[in-house]
Amino acid sequence: PLNKTMRANNLKFFNQHVQVMIFVQLKQGFFLQKSRTGTSPWGQGGYLVEAGMVGPVITSSWVDGGIGGDFVEFMEVAKKFQSVVTLIHDHNVGRVYLDGDRKRIEYDLDDRDFESMREALRGTARIYFAAGARRVYLPTTRRTTIEGSDQVDSVINSLQNGKHMYRINSYHPQGTMRMGADPAKSVVGPDGRCHDLDNVYVPDASLFPSSLLVNPQITVYTCLLYTSDAADDMQCVD
């Protein structure tokens, strides 16, 4: 039955709040900036910047530290690094679907979302240089640094969208079973129950119609309470 539901709806909705980590040689901070570049059906764009925890493992995985002696030299000063995490609200361009009996997941950063990411990198670099940073490391697969505030625009503007060029991740995939009243455009109804199955409810971030800019923990808890109440009411009716 679940495979039937997946095939019927094709699960072509998939979104994330995409995040990248920026490293600098100074200290941390918190900043929220609204960007006026571009618009989307969900608002005016923008990005969220959160203080990030930095340890040796994170540092070595998020920044190209080089190899051999270059890597040793890079890690010797890792204790002087600090980082921030930037989050953006993406445009719901991912897709999850069945290819025969195999599940496929496709997600490429949309050009509009890439512009939001560049704005986040630009704004955060300026914050850190204003605070006294000596160098900013960008989350690229090949080491890219900004050596001063006068280089921010030129370096950020040179970045291009493409596969395997950035160290991007998301801890909170969302929207693979999005909620909606129309079965042709959603997997679960407004009460969280699958359109094609009477006794299956989805209580987590899968039912989000679009990605959230912020961390979704509290919203997931709320959805769980909401859908569990709906399931309980349905059981009482039955």
Image (spheres, helix red, strand yellow):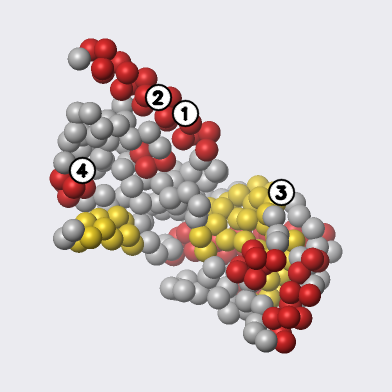
Q: Earlier in the sequence, mark 3 or mark 4?
A: 4
In the rendered image of this protein, does residue 215 appear above or below residue 75?
above
Total marks placed: 4
Q: Nearer the viewer, residue 207 or 234?
A: 234
Disc number at residue 30? 3
Is there a contact, CB below 8 Å, between mark 4 and mark 2? no
Question: How would you rate the neighbour count of disc 4 (Cα within 10 Å): few for under 14, some for 14-19, many for 20 or more?
Answer: few
In the rendered image of this protein, does residue 31 appear above or below residue 20?
above
Answer with left or right where residue 7 lies relative to residue 126: left
Question: How would you rate the neighbour count of disc 1 (Cα within 10 Å): few for under 14, some for 14-19, many for 20 or more?
Answer: some
Disc number at residue 226? 2
Question: How would you rate the neighbour count of disc 3 (Cα within 10 Å): few for under 14, some for 14-19, many for 20 or more?
Answer: some
What amino acid is labelled 2 in the image? Tyr
Cα separation between marks 3 and 1:
26 Å
Q: Earlier in the sequence, mark 4 or mark 1?
A: 4
Q: Nearer the viewer, residue 50 or 237?
A: 237
Give how far across and how far down residue 146 sits, in percent.
71, 74
Residue at which label 1 appears? 222
What amino acid is labelled 3 in the image? Phe
Cα separation between marks 2 and 1:
6 Å
Disc number at residue 2? 4
Q: Secondary structure at mark 4?
A: helix
Q: Nearer the viewer, mark 3 or mark 1?
A: 1
Quadrant holding the C terminus: top left
Is there a contact, CB below 8 Å, between mark 3 and mark 1? no
Q: Is residue 131 visible?
A: yes
What amino acid is labelled 1 in the image? Thr
Quadrant holding the N terminus: top left
Q: Is residue 153 visible?
A: no
Q: Nearer the viewer, residue 116 or 186?
A: 186
